[in-house]
Amino acid sequence: MTVSDQQSNFAVGSKSFTAVAINCAAKAGEWIKTKLGNYTSLSLKYSAQDLVTEVDKGSETMIRNLIHTHFPDHSFLGEEGVEPGPEASEKALQRVRDAEYLWIVDPVDGTTNFVHGFPFFSVSIALSYKGEVIVGVVYDPMRDELFVAEKGKGAYVRGRRMEVSSDAALSKSLIATGFPADPHYALPMNMKGLQALVPQVRNVRSGGSAALHMAYVASGRLSGFWEFGLNSWDLAAGALLVTESGGKVTDTKGAPYDLGVRNVVATNGHIHEEMLTALAKADAAG
Ligand code: 2AM
Ligand code: CA
């Protein structure tokens, strides 16, 4: 059965999976934007770097309710429904990853930016079918950019088909990373990679939203992105955006992307091996 057959068989009220994902991301994103500089409750989760506001929670509730209105039998995994910390995240994913239909949601990716008023954050919504991502939507409410991918049908932004960049070498590439909260493993690993890669590339950016970085690799604005210690909701939608735009997504050791990948390398494909090799050589592949 193709994805479109599944959609027509399971759609409720004639809404496709993708239409519901877009609707949720747009609605939540518009609401988040109105709360910028205007949230009232800020708390720490796992560490002083792991923030949550009532906006994260409200956005997730809004998205979950809307999805369950259309697809009451589907499973749901959202960042704010899971206890903080990597172990709890991995366990929560294990419980649901093989569900027939699973929605994987980051209601605000880039919460630190949101809290500081730095306008680079997103809503990330993916739908997996038996463990494989079939729909991915990342929405940037500040630029009103909606990145959408459907398995086998390509990826689009502003109505245009996306294509990864054509940069063939690290030396001509703009790449991105993030600085994970875990000071014992993920952060030192990323810092080693950073030290090795900065002299080899055109430059490195760190915007603070993994989902948007993935969308930027898909749209050719970045040629590569790597980061340690991410969760399924940071990556699921972006991974489909990248592959449907002609790029490649693996873990930092080169194994193919799946929902359990936490240490990611996403590129235009052309620089993938070079980036993996550079990380391995620097002992920064995990
Ligand atoms: P978040 O804003 O949804 O938490 C930036 O480096 C990326 O790391 C963002 O996508 C951010 O997502 C994620 N991130 C921030 N704190 C994290 C934590 N404690 N564990 C895992 N990922 C985190
Ligand atoms: Ca989040």
Image (tube, grey):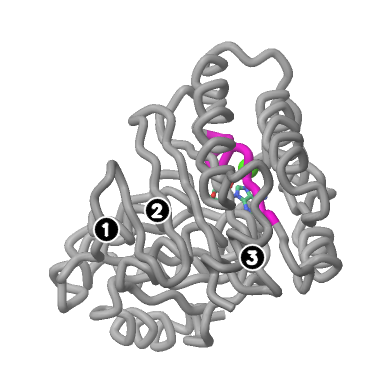
- Residue 151 part of the magenta segment: no
Closer to the camera in the image, 3 or 202:
3
Q: Residue at x 23, y 59 (%)?
A: 220
Q: Please, is residue 263 above or below residue 137 in the view?
A: below
Q: Secondary structure at mark 2?
A: helix
How crowded pointer 1 is (Cα within 10 Å; few <14, some 14-19, many 20+) is rated as many
Give how far apart the Cα atoms at labels 3 and 1 are. Answer: 21 Å
Q: Which residue is drawn at the image coordinates 48% and 52% (left, top)? A: 211
Disc marking residue 128:
3
Mark toward the start of the polypeptide (3 vs 1): 3
The answer to which of marks 2 and 3 sits earlier in the sequence is 3
In this view, 13 is above or below 262: above
Q: Which stretch appears magenta?
A: 103-112
Q: Secondary structure at mark 1?
A: loop
Q: Is residue 214 left or right of residue 38?
A: left
Residue visible at 32% across and 80% down in the picture: 272
